[in-house]
Image (tube, rainbow, N blue to C red):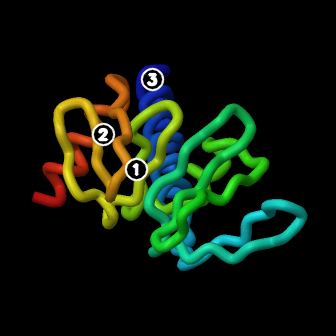
Amino acid sequence: MVLFYLTLYYRYHYYFYKMTDATKTTIHRDFLFVKSEYKLIKIILGDVLFLSGLRDYTQIYIKGKNTPLTTLQNLKEFESKLSANEFIRVHRSYIVSIKQIDTITRSEIIIGNHRIPIGISYKPALDEMIEKNS
């Protein structure tokens, strides 16, 4: 009898957590406002090439701009705001736009003139993304 109630208890919690995960919605964003040099700057996410983390700062490389935009937010904060379908973390210090990737080699990603290293722990997620988009 006790076993019966335990299985009911675990089934309830399993389905409860499944349902709460299913009800979480992801917000699809086309742009972000970023504070840089005492200004709020609107960034179109489609124009972002990649993001580079520097401790508490993040440099945002944007298509058509020579210099990156530097902001006082860490890479982890940006990772939570960006869509997993459009951006992927490939290194402890880099998040790249999937649309902007030109070439992927064994150890780096090339976007324009920039070479971005691929971290060993991020390789499986990158391989999964490549498999999904091949």
Q: Residue furthest right?
A: 38
User: Which residue sits at x=55%, y=55%?
Assistant: 20
Q: Which residue type does callout 3 highlight?
A: Met
> Of marks 1 and 2, which one's residue comes earlier in the chain?
1
Disc 2 marks which amino acid? Ala
Q: Mark 3 points at which residue?
A: 1
- Residue ID for mark 2: 125
- Residue 37 lies, in percent from the top left, at 84, 61
Residue matched to label 1: 88
Q: How far apart are marks 1 and 2 (CA)?
A: 8 Å
Residue extending furthest toward the left: 134
Q: How far apart are marks 2 and 3 (CA)?
A: 44 Å
Whichever of labels 3 and 1 marks the residue nearer the N terminus, that label is: 3
Mark 1, secondary structure of its residue? strand
Is the C terminus in the top left, top right, bottom left or bottom right quadrant?
bottom left
**Contact? badges 1 and 2 (CB < 8 Å):** yes
From the image, state whether disc 2 or disc 3 is nearer to you: 2
Residue type at mark 1: give it. Answer: Ile
